[in-house]
Image (tube, rainbow, N blue to C red):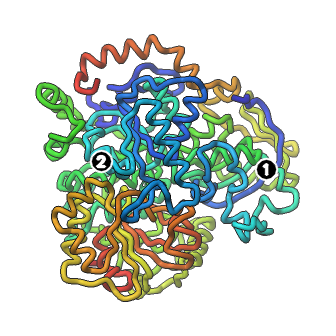
Amino acid sequence: MEKFITHTGIAAPLLRNNIDTDAIIPSREMKTVSKLGLCDGLFAVWRYLDEKARIPNPDFILNQPGYADASILISKRNFGCGSSREHAVWALKEYGFKCIIAESFGAIFYRNCIANGILPIQLSSEKIDQILRHKNNEIDIDLRSQKISFAGESVVFELAGNDRESLLEGLDPISSTLQLSEEINAFRNADQKKRTWLY
Amino acid sequence: MTSSLFEKLWQVHVISELGDSEYLLNIDRVFLHERTGSIALLSLEESGRTIASPENVFCTMDHIVSTRLGRNDNTEMPGGEKFIQATRQAAERAGIQLFDLTHPDQGIAHVVSPELGIAQPGITLVCPDSHTCTLGGLGALAWGIGSTNAEHALATNTLRVQKPKSMRVNFNGTLSDGVSAKDMIIHLISLLGTAGGSGYAVEFAGEAISNLSVEARLTLCNMAVEFSAFTGLVAPDEKTIEYVKGRPYAPSGEQWDKAVAHWQTLHSDPNARFDQEVNIDCKDIKHSVTWGTSPQDAMPANGQVPNPDELQDISSTRREAMQRALQYMALTPGDDINSVKIDAAFIGSCTNSRLSDLRLVADFLRGKKVADGVSAICVPGSSRVKREAEAEGIDKVLIDAGFEWRESGCSMCFYAGGETFGPNKRVISSTNRNFEGRQGPKTRTHIASPLTVAASACAGFIKSA
Ligand code: SF4
């Protein structure tokens, strides 16, 4: 997986609570058994006036001047709630998003971000407002120092140590876990003697 | 030491502590479906890895399959057959149990796994589907994950999990007549908001929970994810043990006795501590229906649509969201919800499509008719539920009343590009999500209990039974 160490990019505000994964990518846009080819369907309902003909809705933030190349998304509470579809993260990633900043996240979506090298940053509404006040919306994110900088100001954020390590190193969690095979087997052998009915 | 139910379930599965409150947990069972499970299986194959314990992995076809009678691989969703065929082939190559389209045990993952005894008290079960929390109703630690984490579970029998905090919601007192588990969970979410359970494993307890049937507990826990909880839980009791007994994948003989002895330890000790505790008085819970586009936008099924401008203690974001929801739902503040006409009624989904739900609906519908102009559809949660309902004549009662009777699957619980009730159509639905577009572009969904759906179908407008 690609490492996330620092990133500089345009931050697009999508300021609503409870943006669910159905809104991030509608089910009908998940057309093939693949993680690819999803970014066209990203935010399809909001992004297009006519979804079939893909006619852009000029009111939608990513269609507004200066935001088409956004790589950071800023939202409010409970971003990515709802369906577990990892397609939401795959679509965001394919569009070019590297980082999502929100007041809080849907738990499964949050895990899916980490699994795909996207940085989910949880910030208070005050800190989010501070970033939003900054008009020239290119911001710098440094995961090593857990700091977001913009126009001479900065805010700090916190990410759980393991998640930070996994993003900084671009670790593949399955490989890391497979290295613990001995421990896993020992556990399961012992468990098999206790919970005999499950093995 | 006193422990909570959640703590006990957690401890049984901890292989090691990875630091920063992340743990490596043993995963007992994995369930997959053709929508997201197919990708997990294919991606695992591509990486050259194999499933560590294929005997503990199960897969069903529920999301995309057609629910029309006489169905085959062709689906309402354009290109849906690709998912079905890819899943079938991948499941075969992986050597896992598949409940294929024509298999007698096919059905919605979260309906099939308890009815077959695959989900049991005390186990960890994961599935790349957010409503996996349903199985907490049996006292299983079960939660939804993404496809990549499903791959992780398949390849290693484990998952790396951030330990959630614990919450207990006590439902005190007894429920009013006809008020159901669905009304309880909608009430809770409307009280504390859709983010109310964020970061918590939530145990549901209290007199009203003990009184619920096991199937009703599954309904309750089904919507724990709508409360943003890591999962929902109900301590297994005699009813649970009775429910699991004799099911195809349940332990038997000597193994059964051992399992039961373990299950009987799975409850919160009297002085167990929780990070948060919430008390709900059951007499406050009414027949509920949602008016907006989030499960927290709920109200009594005979009340008035709220007015965001009159609410003092809400944020501006919430006020805007409410206005937006009212606009999407084409409702005016102050409207009597009972006067709102419906175009369709849907009974189905992993929330409310089990035999007990269908029995309740049939009892209500006996001798009644669906109102003119209302298209009413019932989709049993599994092929087994369908057979059992037919053996009791439930299908006949529903068909006589004017309902369409389908094969099992997720069907119009969500829109995959195929079937929908149509734009601007108003649907009363026994499902769990009323998001914008969930049942189709511009379709307006009101979620409610099966009884409220049936009563509304007959009235032609939203009505509590
Ligand atoms: S019935 Fe609906 S909510 Fe349940 S698994 Fe299927 S699509 Fe998801």
Foreground residue, B164 or B376?
B376
From the image, state whether disc 2 or disc 1 is nearer to you.
2
- Ligand 1 position by quadrant: bottom left
| Residue at image point 40% right, 70% down | B429
* Other residues around mark 2 within 10 Å, as few (<14) / some (14–19) / many (≥20): some
Residue found at x 65% / y 45% = A123
* Location of mark 1 (residue): A11
Q: Residue A154 falls in which quadrant of the image? A: top right
**Image quadrant containing the C terminus of chain B:** bottom left
Q: Is residue B99 left or right of residue A81?
A: left
Q: Is residue B112 left or right of residue B237?
A: right
Q: Is residue B168 visible?
A: no
On screen, residue A97 above or below B465: above
Q: Which mark is residue B389?
A: none
Q: Is residue B198 above or below residue B307?
A: above
* Chain letter for mark 1: A
Q: Secondary structure at mark 1?
A: strand
Q: Residue B105, which numbered label?
A: 2
Residue type at numbered disc 2: Asp
Which of these two is toward me, A124 or B438? B438
